[in-house]
Image: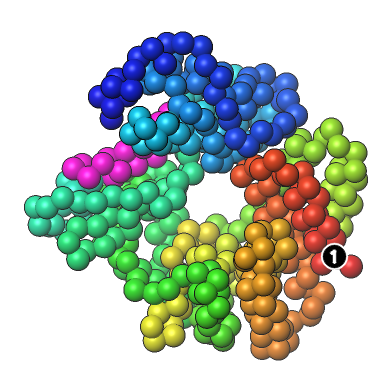
Amino acid sequence: MLAARKQAGNQAGNQAATIPLHPRVDFPEDPNLPELPRLFDGDWVWQAAREHFPDLDTAPGQFRIRQFSHIPGRSAVVSYFADWDPDSYIPSEIINFRLERGKPPEFSRYPQDRQLPGLEPAAHPDTALGLLNKHAFAFPRRRLRVNMIRYRPGSRAVLRHRTGGIKLYARVVRPTALPNLLEAYELLESSGFVVPRIVGCWHEGGLVWLSEIPGKNLRQLMRRGRPPSPTGILDSLEGLWDAPVGTDRRAFDLRGAFRRAMRTFRHALRNDDLALRLLEDVIQRLDPFVRSWQPSTVAHNDLYDDQLLVLPDGRVAVVDFEETGPGDPMLDIGNFLAHLKWTSCIGGSRKRDVSGAYYDQLRTAALDRFRWSEYDLNLREAICLFRVTTNTVRRPSQDWLKRTLDSFRLVAERLE
């Protein structure tokens, strides 16, 4: 890669350049993080990146924001795609910038991530093969192919490892979070869900390998017009909700999640009076429920369509499970419905019809089966939709403010 950069020419990298950054967004300043506005200035990001990574001697054609995470007054992380001119034959890279109050700014390039020590060795084929041989089982001596599926800087990543007919998924978390993930896995094993098999674990690296499940992603099935009946999902969930509740398992922190979303919105919208009025109205209506909520059973606690696979025999598998623990059955369904509602009303037009239809099917099936109060389910759907709305800030677009207001109105509709 370094050779490709040099062949593209040192001159371009040494000259001052205007590097576009997409999307163009304007979030309020944070007095405790004075450099925050610079993270949305492509030229500043480029110059700072060059200082940290000397081999970046050719200016990219653009930066694209992957994710933006902000805890007002405390920290901010922006993850970018750096895209070079196609004629330079330089692949896109992921570059991350972290600000933390009272600490110097920090740059990193995927797969380097000091909070995920297992990520870099798991992302390179040669070292990943060595890890598999040491912590899973002996692999034939052949080239390993690695694909990044998901990555949230400083938090978690999912990689696909393939060699021959062997296909595994490597989940990388902070080493301190690995015991929690393994405990959640044990709870799912006793449920009605199919779960991938753990084939290896590297505790010091926060890395666990899971077998691939030969199923179809539920979200993709919906988009193809072939969604399964909600019955199989409800059957599996009922088995999970009936599992014994352990006394030492950490409960889902609904209040903390609500407060984090609330702080994010109050900062991002503080210069818009209309948005703040809508926000405060929603908060006042949700807050009493959040304060009174208590976990009642084991639950998934982050269930939605993209985390489920449908097997050829009709069984349902869950592939993301680290939040599993004491929770609330109706909150599981409310979260699922909130994601479907978000997709059908805020997402692209191609997705709207299929997500909206499945929303109606799942909601009706759950209310008929469990005889829940519509009002109680609406409350849970509303709080989950409020949390999902943080996507407008975490994955910003030029119309992020309009999308935020539209989503607040959906929350208000659920509370009527």
Residue 218: image location, x then y, percent: 51, 72
Q: Secondary structure at mark 1?
A: helix
Q: Which residues are magenta?
A: 108-127
Residue 76 falls left or right of residue 190: right
Q: Looking at this view, is 360 or 234 the one in front?
A: 360
Q: Residue flagged by tag 1: what amino acid is it?
A: Glu
Residue that protrudes farthest toward the front in the picture: 87
Badge 1 density bin: few <14, some 14–19, many ≥20, Cα 10 Å? few
Give residue 271's position: percent from left, percent from top. Answer: 84, 33
Quadrant in the picture for residue 69:
top right
Q: Is residue 36 left or right of residue 404?
A: left
Visible in this render: residue 292?
no
Residue 76 in the image, given as x and y percentages of width and height: 60, 31
The residue wearing badge 1 is: 413
Q: Quadrant of the C terminus?
A: bottom right
For the point 28% across and 22% down, the residue is 7
- Residue shown at 82%/67% (left/top)? 414
Q: Residue 140's spot in the image, x, y percent?
A: 10, 57
The image shows residue 23, relative to residue 391, as above or below, that is above
- Figure quadrant of residue 111: top left
- Asked whether the viewer can see residue 152, the reply is yes
Locate residue 370: give its quadrant.
bottom right
Q: Which residue is drawn at the image coordinates 26% and 62% (left, top)?
A: 167
- Tell me what residue is drawn at x 46 percent, y 11 percent: 15
Give the side of residue 240 with respect to residue 216, left or right: right
Image check: 200 left or right of 380? left
Q: Does residue 125 show up magenta in the picture?
A: yes
258 or 96: which is nearer to us?
A: 96
Determine the residue located farthest toward the left in the rendered image. 141
Q: Is residue 133 magenta?
A: no
- In the image shown, does 66 or 236 lie closer to the viewer? 66
